DNA sequence: TATTATTATTTGTATATACAAACATTAAAC
DNA sequence: GTTTAATGTTTGTATATACAAATAATAATA
């Protein structure tokens, strides 16, 4: 339940484990993802990036010239989603695109490269938060387990 | 990578466990949720419902007159999202809303009640699919684990 | 070489979701 | 009893994401 005071919302969330749908993986997986997303969003807010922009940008910086298709694979998003993310980041002068023939290459701008250390800090902060809330071992094990199941789901 | 043939896309997805971000819970949780969502979407497509509409509708049928706030708690979505879902389902003549004072009650229509057995079938199909891909034990354990972590994240 | 199939990317359109703010109603406090 | 706080819901606006179709370029094949 949302309790709102002076236009701020403090969240009293029902426990996932008590929900009518707690046994349903659709429900669990989505609710969990939204919460992790929120945590990540907070970590990257200070440099004004959403988590997906941040991850895409880190990849572009670490692999300058990377193609959208490759980004889609790595991030497990559709090509169209990648195009949309890139468009947004081009507006914000964080990446540039060059197209030759059917191939597009994405490069970081100097502004993006300058931002890189701060991005690393945000990532660290996110991990630190995760670990302090979930525990290091628990987090690692869960990520591994989820990846394993993800792989099963995509074949 | 997406391979498209005659306007159909067959997906060769990079393994989550091989991704640059495989250790990151933001990434894992989201990618996993998207895949589970897809599986669920397929199960409910035959009765033309998205998973979130389906879950909301099942709750409304099982608890006629339930209030949006309660739905938000149970589904762990924000009140505004619930409002939007209800609007959509009102258009489709699956629920009706009555408002008295500040309280709103949501009721299923006869059409919705008629659909209920089929919804149960879709849910069953979804579970069956999950189990056949992930294994019954694995699925159960994962849902429990994810719920536990969800709870930790929301306090 | 001409035609066909494949590949990489983008566009049009639609969805679910959220935050912040706005309403409207009820409860509390003074 | 009037003002203030709390509550339940909805709206305005913005986001990420996806599917299907469209482009455009290259590769394969006949």
Image: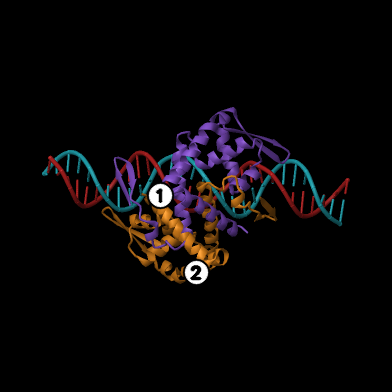
Chain colours: A purple, B orange, C red, D cyan
Dot 2: element: helix
Q: Is residue A75 above or below residue B39?
A: above
Q: Nearer the viewer, residue A33 or A120?
A: A120
Residue A115 seen in the figure: yes
Earlier sequence position, callout 1 versus callout 2? 2
Find residue A107 and name its label: none
| Residue beneath the point at 48% across and 62% down | B141
| Residue beneath the point at 66% across and 39% down | A66
Q: Nearer the viewer, residue B137 or B64?
A: B137
Which quadrant would residue B135 be assigned to in this image? bottom right
Report x, y in % for residue B14: 63, 51
Which chain is indicated by disc 2?
B
Residue B91 seen in the figure: no
In the displayed orientation, state which residue is furthest to the front: A137
Report x, y in % for residue C12: 59, 46
Q: Which residue is mark 2?
A: B124
Q: Nearer the viewer, residue B68 or B148?
A: B148
| Residue beneath the point at 45% across and 58% down | B145
Which quadrant would residue B103 be assigned to in this image? bottom left
Q: Mark 2: give few (<14), some (14-19) or many (20+) Cα within 10 Å.
A: few
Q: Which residue is mark 1?
A: B153
Question: Which label sits in the foreground, 1 or 2?
Answer: 1
Which chain is indicated by disc 1?
B
Q: CA distance from mark 1 to mark 2?
A: 29 Å
Report x, y in % for residue B65: 32, 62
Q: Is residue A63 above or below residue A13?
A: above
Dot 1: element: helix
Report x, y in % for residue B128: 53, 68
């Amino acid at each position: 339940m949302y309790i709102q005071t002076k236009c701020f919302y403090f969240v009293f969330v029902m426990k996932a484990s008590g929900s009518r749908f707690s046994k349903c993986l659709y429900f669990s997986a989505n609710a969990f993802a939204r919460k992790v997303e929120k945590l990540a969003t907070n970590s990257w807010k200070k440099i004004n990036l959403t988590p997906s922009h941040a991850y895409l940008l880190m990849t572009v910086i670490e692999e300058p010239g990377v193609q959208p298709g490759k980004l889609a694979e790595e991030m497990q998003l559709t090509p169209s989603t990648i195009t949309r993310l890139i468009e947004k980041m081009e507006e914000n002068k964080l990446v540039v695109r060059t197209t030759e023939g059917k191939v597009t290459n994405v490069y970081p701008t100097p502004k993006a490269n300058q931002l890189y250390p701060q991005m690393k800090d945000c990532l660290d902060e996110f991990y630190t938060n995760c670990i302090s809330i979930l525990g290091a071992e628990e987090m690692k094990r869960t990520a591994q387990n989820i990846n394993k199941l993800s792989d099963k789901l995509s074949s």
